[in-house]
Image: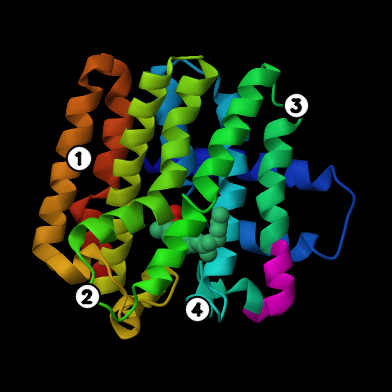
């Protein structure tokens, strides 16, 4: 699992570097690369590849689509760290992009990564039918906008220091984090021109996996140490963030995650052996030993 994730990260980074280097240079290339490399688990690309496996989709095609997803993800991290958002100075074990390059440059580098995602999806080197490419672009823009990541981030900031219900936190976390995972799970079904119902089915699976991933991330913040996490921890509590971990506590959050995994596995049962890879990834996300190592318990 770890080797596979490392290979996916390596292949995604090679493609992203090749893509950026094929363009003319500009002053924003350096902060864009700083936000993209090195680091980043590429878990979203892994999920895309796992679901792509169910549909027998070519690995290289998935790597290119994953590269687009990683651009949006890196953009969200750069903006998330800004003083007007979560105001974090450390990301992936190094100073955040705005600390290294200044705020205005970080905003513009983030914006450029957002548009680069769509440059990648519309590029002729992505060997897919034009209609499929438009459907992918439509889905990724929907997942990123006011009903997806941006809308979720708005709620996350708005809920600070307030008493927020479990359903509202789940909705916020699905938008902020889950929607990008939804795209990763729906993209293979879109590529294979499956019907709307099946695409929705996979989007739903993605939302659940994203929620699981966000809770795991919150658990690291709750009990993790900054050095191993590569970012400042304990900040959710200080900022009064509304998270499922702060509402349910550590033990019930783990139980909540276990239920998500059971539910996703049950849903994917009909895809038989081909769903084995995604099942492994879910266990990796909530691997007790991994948490033990990260949070030093
Ligand atoms: C990106 C469309 C868009 C809008 C910007 C700033 C913002 C609005 C959204 C922030 C969303 C955000 C930061 C969600 C948190 C998701 C999360 C758990 C991040 C950590 O992901 P990892 O662990 O990071 O995969 P690495 O470093 O491994 O890539």
Disc assigned to residue 261: 1
Q: CA distance from mark 4 to mark 1?
A: 31 Å
Of callouts 4 and 1, the N-terminal one: 4
Of callouts 2 and 1, the N-terminal one: 2
Indicate the position of residue 232 as horizontal and vertical percent values: 41, 77
Q: What residue range appears in magenta? A: 99-109
Q: CA distance from mark 3 to mark 4?
A: 36 Å
Mark 2 vs mark 3: in front:
2
Mark 2 vs mark 1: in front:
2
Mark 4 vs mark 2: in front:
2
Q: CA distance from mark 2 to mark 3?
A: 49 Å
Q: CA distance from mark 4 to mark 2?
A: 23 Å
Q: Which residue is mark 3?
A: 125
The residue drawn where x is 17% and y is 35% is 263
Q: Is residue 4 left or right of residue 266?
A: right
The structure's colour scheme is: rainbow
The residue drawn where x is 50% and y is 28% is 187
Indicate the position of residue 67 as horizontal and vertical percent values: 61, 41
Of callouts 2 and 3, the N-terminal one: 3
Between 233 and 76, the one lying in front of the other is 76
Q: Which residue is mark 4?
A: 88
Of callouts 1 and 3, the N-terminal one: 3
On the question of residue 172 being in view, the answer is yes
């Amino acid at each position: 699992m770890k080797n596979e994730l490392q290979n996916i990260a390596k292949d995604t980074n090679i493609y992203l570097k090749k893509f950026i280097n094929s363009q003319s240079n500009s002053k924003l290339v350096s902060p864009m690369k700083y936000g993209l490399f090195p680091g980043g688990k590429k878990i979203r690309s892994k999920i895309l590849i796992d679901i792509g496996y169910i549909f027998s989709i070519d690995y290289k095609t998935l790597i290119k689509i994953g590269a687009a997803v990683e651009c949006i993800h890196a953009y969200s991290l750069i903006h998330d760290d800004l003083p007007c958002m979560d105001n974090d100075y450390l990301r992936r074990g190094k100073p955040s992009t705005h600390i290294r390059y200044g705020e205005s440059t970080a905003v513009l580098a983030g914006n450029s990564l957002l548009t680069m995602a769509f440059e990648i999806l519309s590029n002729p080197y992505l060997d897919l039918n034009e209609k499929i490419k438009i459907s992918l672009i439509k889905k990724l823009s929907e997942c990123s906008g006011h009903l997806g990541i941006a809308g979720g981030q708005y709620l996350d900031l708005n809920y600070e220091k307030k008493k927020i219900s479990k359903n509202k936190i789940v909705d916020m976390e699905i938008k902020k984090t889950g929607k990008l995972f939804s795209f990763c799970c729906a993209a293979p079904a879109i590529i294979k021109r499956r019907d709307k119902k099946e695409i929705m089915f996979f989007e739903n699976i993605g939302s659940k996996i994203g929620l699981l991933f966000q809770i795991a991330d919150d658990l690291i913040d709750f009990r993790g140490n900054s050095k191993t996490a590569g970012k400042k921890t304990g900040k959710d509590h200080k900022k009064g963030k509304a998270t499922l971990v702060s509402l349910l506590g550590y033990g019930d959050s783990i139980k909540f995650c276990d239920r998500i995994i059971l539910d996703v596995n049950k849903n994917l049962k009909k895809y038989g052996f081909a769903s084995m890879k995604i099942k492994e990834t879910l266990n990796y996300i909530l691997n007790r030993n991994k948490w033990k190592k990260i949070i030093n318990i």
